[in-house]
Image: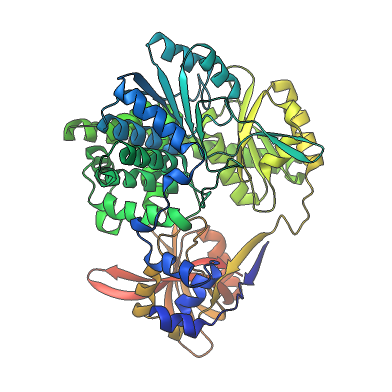
Amino acid sequence: MERWFITMKKADFNGIAEKYHISPIIARLIRNRDVIGDEEIDFYLNGTIADLYDGMLMKDMDRAVEILAEKIREEKKIRVIGDYDIDGVNATYILQQGLSELGADIDTDIPDRIKDGYGLNIALIDRALDDGVDTIITCDNGIAAADEITYGKENGLTIVVTDHHEVPYIEEEGEKNYILPPADAVVDPHRADCGYPFKGLCGAAVAYKLVEALCNVMQREPEDLDYLMENVAIATVGDVMDLTGENRVFVKQGLEMLKRTQNPGLKALIECTGIDVDRLNAYHIGFVIGPCINASGRLDTAKRALELLNARTRRDAVMLAEDLKALNDSRKEMTERGVNEAINMIETTSLKDDHVLVVYLPDCHESIAGIIAGRIREKYYRPTFVLTKAEDGVKGSGRSIETYDMFAQMCRCRDLFTKFGGHKLAAGLSLTEGNVPLFRKTINELAELSEEDLQMKVSIDMRLPFPYITEELISELELLEPFGKGNPKPLFAERNLRVISPRIFGRNRNVLKCRLQDEQGSQMDAVYFGDVEACLKAMEEKQVMSFTYYPSVNEYMGRRSLQLTIVNYQ
């Protein structure tokens, strides 16, 4: 059951509207996103690259830059070690491109998801030592690799960490003792002693800041590397960072660059997935481009995605793009099977009574556990862990709900895991097979979740009667883009709407179309893309209902018409 509520935040909407030449509706939507005060509103509407903070404000950035500038001058061999997801791959590419343009002798390595697992490990360090590497730079990992970095340092390596994950800590008598790795420089905005004003950067953005700072120190034009902002945008959306503050500028600017990208690999990927490049937006990164880049790290090796970004010829680019798309298609099929198996298990066992779902699917490919966990969390609106059988023991991924801090709860039963990490809304873990039932039992006993916590909250921006919905308003809504986590698409609602002639369309019968009529007799076309059978049944039973929706302009055969996309119904 969903709980709907209207966000009623107060401000002088007419005053804001007048000052920024926007409508009071847009002013209210901006206030609902907690953008307050002239400086913030101006940055939200008009922020550009010039407004980004100086990377040197990050703790240890000066040390990292000094070390790397010296290593480049001395022609020492530098290796970037990234991660196998979309953020890690783009961060790796940014460091590799940026440093090689500054004259570095540089190569890259990315762990294999199944063989190596997440982050830096001893095998990767040994490989670097065997290859005569002098300096390792990590990106999107490293903050939790204290033991591995100690080993690397003992063997004479210089190590620079760039990461954006939370710093691990041990809690003693209510005090958090943070464990920083003993690297030569540790650049991570989440360090307690880092004064950088914006904490929400992804790994690729931290890598970009490093490359930019290095350019300045080596007296090169940082503008020459602006094109790497498209990679920051892909990583920011793909790693589901909040699209607020600096991230908003990165994604806004990066999307514009991506429309005109000179990168043969990205060009080929946009073409082969059928995206209309002029209308490219954050949705396409999150649900089309991103999953293809991630699929290589899941089912093959993330080095394939890095190869795509590095492709020089159109022929190579097209071949690699088609490979990634095919991998993603097979990943989708595997995901569907896994989701169905998980639902079946929950519905037919005592699992359905648990507040925290721990689903063990031994035969599932371990790389898609997180996606399945996300889908199960959506269906049941409960924190969900999906575990799979791995080479040594059991591995899994968790996805959480707003009211449950997953990482904090896992810290309370850390003795059950051989390895774990994550943050409030997502986590990864390894444990022995024997501990699976105990983990399920313990994590549920620790969970202090009320029935209210387990109700999906639908936050509505405002009631929007049909006469207010115009083409002008719809084009003005574009000022609020890019939409995503932290800057959701506006959600409007209206009640007592009569449903006229609902019917299901589409080759796969996955679209419901109808007309909606308000109490004054105004009508609008509407479409719905969720569980269409259930929606149709509700419409036929009730006829008068409440809806949440987002308005858009539908262009079909040269005709433009207003239509609502229904999001929720009651």
Q: Quadrant of residue 44?
A: bottom left
- Residue 523 visible to the viewer: no
| Left/right of residue 350 with respect to residue 181 in the rendered view | right
Q: At 76% across and 33% down in the image, what residue appears? A: 413
Q: Quadrant of residue 369?
A: top right
- List the single residue furthest toward the top: 130
Q: At 64% across and 71% down in the image, what residue appears? A: 5
Q: At 58% across and 21% down in the image, what residue appears? A: 390
| Left/right of residue 529 with respect to residue 132 in the rendered view | right
Q: Position of residue 217 (x, y in %)?
A: 33, 38
Nearest the viewer among 47 and 312 is: 47
Q: State the count of labels.
A: 0
Instruction: Locate the N terminus and report the quarter of the image it occupies.
Output: bottom right
Q: Position of residue 45 (x, y in %)?
A: 40, 68
Q: How is the image coloured?
A: rainbow
Q: At 79% across and 48% down in the image, what residue appears? A: 448
User: In the picture shown, does residue 299 fall above or below 133?
Assistant: below
User: In the picture shown, does residue 530 fall above or below 154?
Assistant: below
Q: Position of residue 55 (x, y in %)?
A: 43, 45
Instruction: Locate the C terminus and report the quarter of the image it occupies.
Output: bottom right
- List the single residue furthest toward the bottom: 520
Nearest the viewer among 102 and 141 is: 102
Q: Quadrant of residue 427?
A: top right
Q: Position of residue 408 (x, y in %)?
A: 70, 41
- Residue 498 visible to the viewer: yes
User: In the picture shown, does residue 78 fall above or below 385?
Assistant: above
